[in-house]
Amino acid sequence: MFAERTNWNLAANRLSEALARRRASGAPLLDLTASNPTECGFRYDAESIFSALRNPAALKYQPNPKGLETTRLAVTEYYSSLGANVSVDEIFLTTSTSEAYSFAFRLLCNPGDELLIPAPSYPLFSFLGDILDVRLVRYPLIYDHGWQIDFQSLQDGVTPRTRGVIVVNPNNPTGHFVKAREMQALNELCAERSLTIIADEVFLDFGLSGASPLTFATNNQALTFTMSGLSKIAGLPQMKMAWLVASGPAALKRQALEKLEVIADTYLSPSAPVQLATPLFLEQRGGFQEQVLARVRQNLNELDRQLKAQKTYSRLQVEGGWYVVLRVPATRSDEELALTLLETSDVYVHPGHFFDFAAEGYLVLSLIATEQEFSEGVRRILESSFSS
Ligand SMILES: Cc1ncc(COP(=O)(O)O)c(C=O)c1O
């Protein structure tokens, strides 16, 4: 009855089964996988959110494949604040970054065509690839005094069926920002081989260095689709508002915009109330981002303080984003370790393989968990190394 692309192994794994049992029992749990900003104790201005959603203009249906112009203007202002000059005509509003990915994949790929994706990275890609009939080929990010793209492997991964390269800037969960020289090398590789760059910048505003981040939104040496949205930059994933910005050599960009318009016109996804409220949501992002960055810094400091007192665990460098990678002894699988932590210490962490780490020996911790939860969770993780 069902298409082969849906032949997923839907059986629960040992970790998800143990988690379900734990949650059902109501036993306390320190959740260091927390990624939902609306459940991490951040303050939101509820009144102004509600009043922005009560705009009478929402009573009128004004279909536009790219989304309302006033909303796109607010998105251009977001990019202006990053020093990037994006035109309203180059923006498509979508209901999520995942939907923006689907537009780009459908525009670029015939069934079985390939896109290069970073590893480690975000687990949603494999489902997007299956659903959209795209074969995802991994290129490694390597860790050597910080993360970097392994360009040799990236180049070796290109085949006649490759249509583009996905970069996550900064990457989830490594926190690696694409550097100017990496952007240049990506441009050369993609322009030479007629590949498109797909840049996911949902965490762009969460850099820890304070330096202005490098965005792909105005990259014009190769055809480029840059995506972001309210989920992370304004901490409002429930509003379902994201966007895709097209840039690149003029003729290619024009063709891409025309074709994307047909795709977007077929769905007309974002709702009027949310589109109308988005300028205000974007205006308020500063208050949310300050809270997140303060939390991330505090949790990282606490982690470093606790790590200093022992020698078994260490952490990898973090340039930005909401996660930190803990280096742990690979004496057993990361899944075994995560399971033990859950069952004996009531701490839930993601094993590295969840994010496609090539080897054992990594756990991923959320830096947006509340300070108390994070500090106690880390204490129990480090304590468990003495008993194992
Ligand atoms: C790198 C990355 N891209 C995209 C998303 C999803 O964003 P959206 O809610 O806009 O689909 C996430 C969510 O965790 C993410 O980590």
Image (spheres, rainbow, N blue to C red):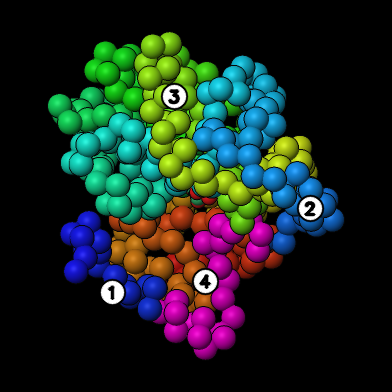
Give the mark nearest the N terminus, 2 or 1. Answer: 1
What amino acid type is highlighted by mark number 1? Ala
Q: Of marks 1 and 4, which one's residue comes earlier in the chain?
A: 1
Label 2 Cα neighbours within 10 Å, binned few <14 / some 14-19 / many ≥20: some
Choose between 21 and 232: the one closer to the eye: 232
Magenta-tinted stretch: 18-39
Q: Which mark is residue 54?
A: 2
The picture quadrant where one finds residue 336 is bottom left
Measured in 3D between alpha carbons, the distance from the residue under mark 4 to the one under mark 3, in whole angstroms, is 47 Å
Q: Out of 65 and 19, give the one closest to the viewer.
A: 65
Identify residue for label 4.
Answer: 347
Q: Is residue 301 visible?
A: no
Q: Is residue 224 above or below residue 44?
A: above
Bin the neighbour count of mark 4 within 10 Å (Cα to Cα): few under 14, some 14-19, many 20 and up: many
At 27% from the left and 51% from the top, the residue drawn is 130
With respect to residue 258, does 92 lie above or below? below
Q: Earlier in the sequence, mark 3 or mark 2?
A: 2
- x and y, in percent, of residue 193 in the image: 24, 18
First in residue order: circle 1 vs circle 3: 1
Label 4 beta carbon less than 8 Å to ligand 1: no
Q: Which residue is mark 3?
A: 257
Q: Nearer the viewer, mark 2 or mark 1?
A: 2
Spatial distance from mark 1 to mark 4, Cα to Cα? Answer: 23 Å
Residue in the picture at 34% in, 49% down? 128
Which of discs 1 and 4 lies nearer the camera? The answer is: 1
Tag 4 near tag 2, CB within 8 Å: no
Rendered image: mark on residue 11: 1
Give the residue drawn at x 57%, y 86%: 26
Q: As shown in the figure, which amino acid type bears the numbered disc 3?
A: Leu
